[in-house]
Image (cartoon, rainbow, N blue to C red):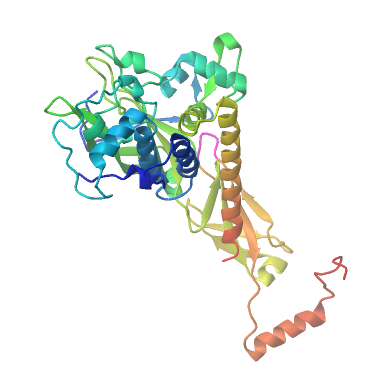
Amino acid sequence: MAIRHHDEITGAILDEESELSLSELCRACGMPAERIIALVEEGVIEPRGHRTRWRFSGICVRRVRKVYTLERDLGVNLAGAALALDLLEEIERLQARLARLESRED
Amino acid sequence: MEYKDYYSILGLERGADQAEIKRAYRKLARKYHPDVSKEEQAEDRFKEVSEAYEVLKDPEKRAAYDQVGAGYHSGEEFRPPPGWDAGFEFHGGGYTEADPEAFSDFFESLFGRAGGFGGGFGGAQRRQFHAEGENTYAKIAIDLEDSYRGGTRQITLKHSVLGPDGRPQIKERKLNVKIPKGITEGQQIRLTGQGEPGVGEGKPGDLYLEITFNPHRLYHAEGKTVYLDLPLTPWEAALGAKVQAPTPDGPVHLTIPANSKDGSKLRLKGRGIPAKEPGDLYVVLNVVAPPANTEAEKDAYRQFSQAFEFDPRTGMGG
């Protein structure tokens, strides 16, 4: 698909409501199915539906990629990367709250 | 081309042993990992650190680097001597899964490009003549208003393309990306075919853009819920009032109920981020007491103290 340099391009949103099949998620994340299945077993991502017809939310792409880069770059194992991801998201939530509360003090 | 001092990037002496190199790398990688660090330059620092480690952790590459770089200092103009790598043998498998796109010209001039022989997922596919391009992942910071109204943002991407000499080179590419209305922080936009180019007749990969919001003077978003702090005078809060408040959709008229407390929230249903199911906007009341400067103002406060049997410190003991 050739796209000229300054054309405006429109993408699809990957959000909580978008649904991906296992193979679509594999493609999106650039990973084999075994990796995705391991992440499901670790509880990093939670698909809806029965194992033969898993549906993943669009948010999973980000979680899968983050766990992958954490494992690759920091030498942590899957469980460690999953923990780091949960903690990072918790920190993000707290920072958002903190920013909100601090703005009241101005 | 600038000489890069891989030892000083990792904060090491030239004689550091392999265990020290690994330790220094791990520590810096944790500090600057783009998924972990909130520091401004984290991503650039992380790339530098990864590149330094890529070379120093491998005894072959480290020896070559030490030999060719002896006498150079960081930032100096560097020219590899012709035939410098004779006698060294670099094994294709020596590259890790680190992102080879990220490495500098300096690295490439010494060791060539890691791409194409990299380990990691998809490595096997890349060796076929036709192969789909890899997906790429990037972050983009937008304003909250962009999510309310939709908009276009220009982003700059670094891509590897085949140069006239048949060697891949890094090219910058600008894209005008449409920001879909209702997008929230952490969601991604998938741009089909905007990833790495394919090999042969392979299709290009997709580009995934993760959305973050720039900090806003007035609003804070958490998911699709948006918060606004609204300052009120004590009498507005006590007596009730009609006030105007800004929202990302434009100003609204609010009725403040009598005896509203500081910190209490008014919910404006559906005025948060206009997702498929729109979020709510919470107006958080912030009661601000004015300072008493003039005599009249001081009198007003004195009348307060006459009128009220009010001790905010009841129950504190002591």
Q: Quick check: B138 above or below B256?
A: above
Residue B30 percent coordinates (x, y): 50, 41
Q: Nearer the viewer, residue B71 or B314?
A: B71
Is A2 above or below relative to B291? above
Q: Is residue A79 left or right of residue B35?
A: right
Residue B24 percent coordinates (x, y): 46, 42
Determine the image quadrant of residue B209: top left
Choose between B116 and A33: the one closer to the eye.
Answer: B116
Q: Position of residue B79 (x, y in %)?
A: 17, 41
Quarter of the figure that contains the C terminus of chain A: bottom right
Residue drawn where x is 25% and y is 26% of the image: B88
Q: Spot the residue most to the top.
A: A52
Residue at 60% of width from left, 23% of height from top?
A46
Q: With A77 as the anchor, is B103 left or right in this view?
A: left
User: Which span is picked out in magenta?
Assistant: B274-278
Q: Is residue A60 left or right of residue B301?
A: left
Q: Is residue B286 magenta?
A: no
- Residue B290 in sight from this viewpoint: yes
Foreground of the two, A43 or A10: A43
- On-image quarter of the N terminus of chain A: top left
Question: Residue at point 61% right, 47% down?
Answer: A94
Q: Is residue B183 visible?
A: no
Q: Is residue B277 magenta?
A: yes
